[in-house]
Amino acid sequence: MQGFKEKEFDEKIDFSIWRRLLKFARPYRRDLIAIIIAMAITAAADIALPLLTKYAIDTYIAGNSLQGLPGFMAVYAVIFGIQGALVAFFVRKASKVEMYVSYDIRKEGFKRLQQLSFSFYDHTPVGYMMARMTSDVNRLSETIGWSLTDVAWSICFVLGVAGAMLAMNWRLALLVLVVLPPLAVVSLYFQKKILHYHRIIRRTNSRITGAFNEGITGAKTSKTLVREQANLEEFQVLTKEMYRSSVKSATFSAIYMPIVMVLGSIGTALALWQGGNIALLTGFGTLAAFLSYTTQFFDPVQQLARIFAELQSAQAAAERVMNLVETQPEITDSQGVEAIYGDVFAPKRENWEPIKGRVTFQHTGFAYQSGERVLEDFNLDVRPGERIALVGETGAGKSTIVNLLCRFYEPTEGQILIDGKDYRARSQLWLQSNLGYVLQSPHLFSGTIADNIRYGNRSASLEQVRRAARLVHADGFIEALEKGYDTQVGEGGNLLSTGQKQLISFARAILPDPQLFVLDEATSSIDTETEALIQQAIYNVLENRTSFIVAHRLSTIRSADRILVIGGGKIIEQGSHRELMAQRGHYYELYTRQFMQERQDDLLAGVEKVE
């Protein structure tokens, strides 16, 4: 989506992000604590093995005696058995945490998407949202389930080994541990580089997901415009950008790990260099244990380095997931309103007043965040049951007026009253539950025709569905289908014509029996035959309902009680069709120009049929 810019984050590890993210792991803290305990016991067993080896060398080899060896081997076997059981326990628990955390983040993200205002969807690409809730969530759940628990084992083991080495020979232990400061410096340098490129990868992944989405949903348009090659070239630009960033990230990771290994080898070499003194003074068992600890000490250090590198990648995902999950809706109900009316997930319908349908715009103004002003000092009083038509040039403010009425946006100045009360004093759900809305481009969901008609009221009976379809004259084509109301509509309704989808959307809007009704250019994209069907239904549908009709075809609104001609966000003319035609003003010009164009189109269509 052109103009969309992702939030930029600091070029360093942000522990506050991880603290906020770990709230999703709190419900499973018992599992995490159990994992940490299991890892600590496993680390203790790993630390005990070199000490057992030391005992075996000093007792059985240096002492030239095999007495007690079977018992020693039994202890060794028990420790290995305990380790195996603990690893199985760890894998089971870590898998559980990963799956549940993934589920909880996605649920919270989807819940937030249901709450966000229209303005968010106006400026946020679908690919961005899809990438956050799929690949990024997978990355985070893996990190919480596995990487953070690996950290527990590594830290326990490093501390245990360091303590054991210091206890055996503190001078030699300090000589081995001298490599840790340069390791820390190297880690700080590489983590910044790796994090930088992983952020680029995550941003590019969002754009690639968006390109996939647009390529699939717009496949027909691309083919008719012969855009296949151009689309492929644009997609290749994105994939090459991701490839370059991935290679650079992998290069830094590839350099980082060998450096850690080299530093570990240096520590081992120092231990060997000075190890002869240990053998002479304390025996070969101590030397063997010390060398084993020196070698093993850098295994968890390398693992910590690997996990640290993975956290760079995971933070890039964490930043974007939390940015989405914590995005606040621009339009919210006050706490006082929610206390009375409830919210979208827990409505208190018993407190909802019936709506009469009087709508009043009082000195209403609206401007987008960019500063673009659309309405200024707009005033309108609509009686209950009155049919209002809005006409005007593109960009005049017609759709903005109905979007404000529906509370998809809120006025930046003035107020809108429903039955004499500011509509912000009632909940969004109260208003929108009393509202029927039919868009220019209807969207149907995968499922049957009946499922789509009852989409806003799942408990509606089949007879109620049929009644709504009959009211909008959709029953004719539905019952002509082989499976009738059980016919599958396909993804987005692609198995039906545009006109059929629009009729179903009319039935869906009328099923809850709303008192307010909005038709936003609902007949502009359908054929004349379907338009005739809808025109027959509109009068019945809108009878005794307060309605707003945004019209492209002016012939469809001649029966409106009042027609408002909108220009520059203001009412420049108003009256009935007959009154406005008599004035010979803006409406007269719009109507006659469109009428002449339609007559010309009809004549041309007739000539083509003759030929």
Image (cartoon, rainbow, N blue to C red):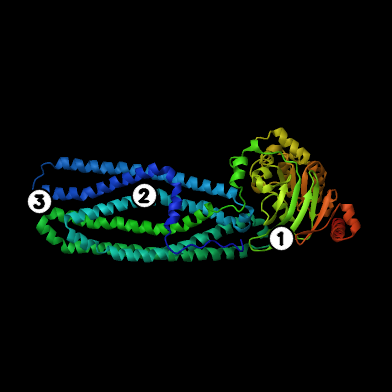
Q: Residues within 10 Å of mark 1 (few under 14, many from 20)?
A: some
Q: CA distance from mark 1 to mark 3?
A: 93 Å
The amino acid type, in three-letter code, at marker 2 is Thr
Residue 168 in picture, x, y percent from top left = 17, 55
2 vs 3, front mark: 2
Which residue occupies the foreground of this view, 497 or 263?
263
The image quarter in which residue 278 lies:
bottom left
Q: In terms of depth relative to the viewer, which is nearer, 93 or 478?
A: 93
Looking at the rendered structure, the kind of residue marked 3 is Ala
The tag earlier along the polypeptide, 1 or 3, is 3
Residue 356 can be seen in this image? yes
Res 494 visible = no
- The label shown at residue 149 is 2
Which mark identifies residue 62? 3
The amino acid at mark 1 is: Val
Drawn side of residue 582 relative to residue 462, left or right:
right
The image shows residue 421 at horizontal and vertical percentages of 71, 46
SS assignment at label 2:
helix
The relative height of residue 196 versus residue 56 in the rendered view (above or below) is: below
